[in-house]
Image (cartoon, rainbow, N blue to C red):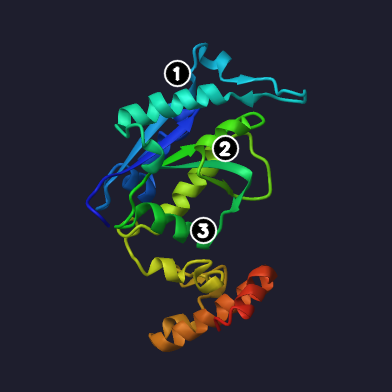
Amino acid sequence: MTDRRFNIWIITLFPGYFEPYLEFGVAGAALKGERGVNFKLHLVNIATHSDKDWKGIDSAPYGGGAGMVMRADVLKNTIINGVVRPGNYGDNFREKLHVVYTSPRGRKWNNESCMEFAKKLWSSDSKKDLVLICGRYEGLDERFIKNYVDEEISVGDYVLTGGEIPVLCILDSALRFVPGVLGNKDSLSHESFGEGLLEHPQYTRPQVFEGEDVPGILLSGHHANIEKYRKEERIRITKENRADLFEKYLNGGLE
């Protein structure tokens, strides 16, 4: 991790979505600059950058249709006055910021995306700060997307009422790949989707629960046999529950 501070700007109509997130878990601690990482989270309220507050942020779509569309001019004002000026990014701010909009047409978010995203934005050679835009209503004016958005990301093939939850999903999943955020770096390789497989079943005390004992191999103390058993269980669980992942695993020749 580099010594420079990584600023994360979230543009949203509901900053309150994110305030509790900072108070819990390893990701929240990281975003407060703890756990040996130098992050700073900034919440930017779109409504404060509209001449008419809430009433001026959206308008009916040209050509007709249901719903409302977030205005390009208000979103530009939010970027300039809520991010560029307070962050002192200057006139060439497009070279210093990576602007992300969560959208159904964006790149599908998965474990590989998390790793790539974290490396691109938060590694020692990263030069840009991150801006995340939470859309609402029917989305953003296309002209704003064209002129100011660098990347669109989709967290799945379903519709949510706004972009706040997808942004939380992106942050929570990608931050885990930043060195220092997780207490145990080995956790990443043993979790679900590590090596393309789901995680093996986990057991803890009591040893016997409702007449069922912990698998004996886990009590043996033979670490090589335990690892072999867990790998077999990961393959079994993946094959039974996620045929798509199992097929990808076989085709990738990871076994």
Q: Quadrant of residue 81?
A: top left
Which residue is more in the foreground, 137 or 245?
Answer: 137
Label 2 to label 1, Cα distance in Å? 23 Å
Give amino acid for label 2.
Lys
Residue 86 placement (x, y as % from top left): 31, 28
How far apart are the alpha carbons under marks 1 and 3? 33 Å
Residue 146: which disc? 2
Q: Position of residue 198 (x, y in %)?
A: 56, 69
Name the residue: 51% across, 14% down: 53
Q: Which residue is mark 3?
A: 113
Disc on the earlier residue, 3 or 2: 3
Residue at 57% of width from left, 14% of height from top? 55
* On-image quarter of the N terminus: bottom left
Quadrant occupied by the C terminus? bottom right
| Mark closer to the chain start, 1 or 3 | 1
Amino acid type shown at disc 3? Ser
Q: Is residue 93 above or below residue 191?
A: above
Rendered residue at 50%/44% (across/down)? 150
Q: Amino acid at mark 1?
A: Thr
- Does dot 2 land on a helix, a strand or a loop? helix
- Cα–Cα gap, marks 3 and 2: 22 Å
Please say if the residues under marks 2 and 1 sit with CB atoms less than 8 Å apart: no
Between circles 3 and 2, the one closer to the viewer is 2
Q: Are marks 3 and 2 in contact (CB under 8 Å)?
A: no
Query: Is residue 146 depicted above or below 121 in this figure?
Result: above
